[in-house]
Every structure is written in structure tokens, then in C-alpha cells.
Amino acid sequence: MSDVSPSICKVKTHNKNGLGFLLKYQINEKYFYCLISSDDIITENMIKNEDSIIIYYNNFLNNREIKLKKERYIKNFKEIFIDVTIVEILDKDNI
């Protein structure tokens, strides 16, 4: 459990709190870093408005503000009835 704990996140928005986790996924020779959370926490309206979220990670010892800007890959899966939103973590986020 201790290996996974640093990747579990608390996600704070302007009106909700929830959980998510950080994921590192290898695609060919590159890694893709992202936050995965519920689309009830990171909503379509927040993405359209380019709102910010705060994530608390590393056993909630660290936090970062993430702006939901179009420079990130952001995807929800409502069209296939999966309650998940993926937000790309960029190098500049320093996570």
C-alpha cells in the first residue's frame, strides 16, 4: 500500500472535494502523466471555463494548482457511460 499512497490525490475544486490518483503510462518510448478522477469532481463546465483545481498528493504532503487549459489533454468518457475524467500533468506542473 505504501508504494501506491503517494499517487492517491485529494482533488479540491471551487465547490467540491473528491479523490483521484496520479498515473504514469508508457506510450512507445515516452511517458504520459495524468490525474484520473470522477467527472462529478472535474466537470465539463469546469473544463470549458478553464477553471483551476488543487491536488494534494504524496500522502497529502504536497499540493499544486492545475489550470484546466486547452494545452493539456483532458478527456471524460461520458459518451460510453464511464464516470472518469483524465487531465494531463505537464512538466511545468512540477509533480
Image (cartoon, helix red, strand yellow):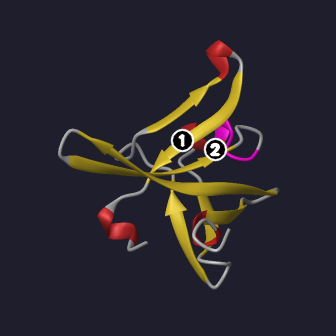
Residue 10 position (above or below residue 27): below
Residue farthest bottom in this picture: 61
User: Residue at label 2?
Assistant: 46
**Residue 12 in magenta stretch:** no
Q: Nearer the viewer, mark 2 or mark 1?
A: 1
Q: Residue at x 74, y 47 (%)?
A: 41
Viewer-proximal residue among 3 and 47? 3
**In the picture provided, is 82 more to the left or to the right than 4?**
right
Report, in whole angstroms, how far the alpha carbon at label 2 lies from the one at label 1.
Answer: 13 Å
- What amino acid is found at the position of numbered circle 1 in the picture? Ile
Main SS, magenta region, reads loop
User: Residue at label 1?
Assistant: 86
Q: Residue at x 66, y 78 (%)?
A: 59
**Other-residue count near label 1 (Cα within 10 Å), few / some / many at <14 / 14–19 / ≥20:** many
Q: Residue at x 20, y 38 (%)?
A: 28
Residue 29 position, x and y percent, is 17, 46
Q: Residue at x 69, y 24 (%)?
A: 82
- What amino acid is found at the position of numbered circle 2 in the picture? Met
Q: Secondary structure at mark 2?
A: helix
What is the magenta range?
41-45
Residue 37 position (above or below residue 48): below
Residue 58 position, x and y percent, is 59, 77
